[in-house]
Amino acid sequence: MDKTIELVNGVKDIQAMPSVIVRVLNVMKKPTVNMKELGDIVMYDQSLTIKILALVNSAYYGFSQQISSINIALSLLGMVKVKNIIVAVAMKPMMSGAGDKELWKHSIRVAAGCEYLAKLTKIMDADEAFIAGFIHDIGKMVLHMTNPKMYEKVIEVAKSGHDILEVEKKYFDSDHVRTGSLLAKRWQLPILLANIVSYHHAPSLSSIPVPCNLVCAVDKLMQETLDPSQIDKDFMKTMGIDMEDIEDLRNAIMNKAELLIAELT
Ligand SMILES: [Fe+2]
Ligand SMILES: [Fe+2]
C-alpha cells in the first residue's frame, strides 16, 4: 500500500471531521442559510457558546458594547466568521492531539495573517483567507499522531535549516502535503481549501495560485524565526508590500493572532 494511504488510514481519530464542523458546513451549503440554524448549532455546544461570546467581546473584533447574547454575537460577526471560529475551535483538540500545541497556534497565526493581508490588499475575500490559512498544515496532524516523538525530531531537524517536506519524507516516507491532500479528499473539503493544502509549498503549480501564494507567504512570515529571504518578494510586490516593512507586518499580525489565541485557548 502507498505509504501516504497507510499513514492516513492509521490515524482513525481524524478520519472523520468533528461532527460540529460537518453540521456547520452542511448548514452553510444550503442556498438559503439562516442564522437561526447556525445559532442552534452553537447554542447546543456550551464551550462554543462561551468561546464565541468571549471572542466577540475581545479586542480582536473590537466592538464597543458588551455582548452577552449569542444571537447578537452571530449577527454582529456574520455567519462566515462564525463558521470560521467554529472550525478553529472544533479542530483544536485534534490539532493538539498527541501534544502538538504548536500546530494549532501556528495555524491560528497563519489564519490571522491571511485575513489581515486579504483585508489590506483585497486580493481575496478575508473570511475565505482566514480559513485557508487555518487549514494549510492539516497533513501535519497525521504525521504527528502517527509518531509524535519522530515528528518532534522532524521539527527539530527542519529548524536547523532543512526543508520540512524533505525531512518528513526521510522519516515518514511521505510528507504533510501528501497526507494533507488525502485528508482533504476524505473530508471532501471545497476545491479552494484542498488546493491550499496541496500547494502551499509550491503555489505556482496550483490552478488557483493567488490564495496559495498568500498562504505560502504568510506561512513563511509566521515562522518562529523570520527569514525574509524565504518570502516571495515579487508576490509581496503585487500586494503592494515593501520588503522593508516585513518585520512590522509580522509584529502586527502576531499581536492580532495572540488576541485570538488567548480567547480561543
Ligand atoms: Fe506546510
Ligand atoms: Fe505552516
Image (spheres, rainbow, N blue to C red):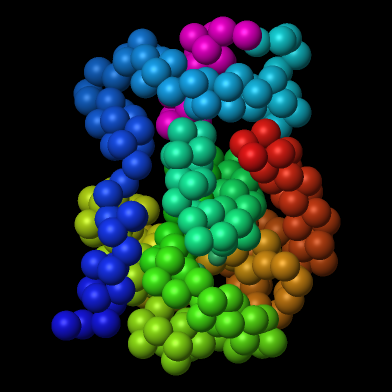
Q: Quadrant of residue 157?
A: bottom right
Task: Check the image and name the residue furthest to the bottom.
Answer: 170
Q: Is residue 48 above or below residue 162?
A: above
Residue 111 located left or right of residue 146: right
Q: Image point 50% across, 61% down: which residue?
A: 98
Residue 126 located left or right of residue 186: right
Main SS, magenta region, reads helix
Q: Is residue 161 above or below residue 109?
A: below
Indicate the position of residue 132 as horizontal and vertical percent values: 46, 51
- Quadrant location, the N terminus: bottom left
Residue extent of the magenta highlight: 68-84
- Tell which of 17 and 145 is nearer to you: 145
Q: Is residue 265 above or below residue 159?
A: above
Decide if residue 9 is in sight here.
yes
Queried whether the magenta region covers residue 70, the answer comes back as: yes
Q: Image point 81% across, 62% down: which residue?
A: 247
Indicate the position of residue 119 as horizontal and vertical percent values: 60, 41
Indicate the position of residue 14 as horizontal and vertical percent values: 34, 55
- Tell which of 242 and 10 is nearer to you: 10
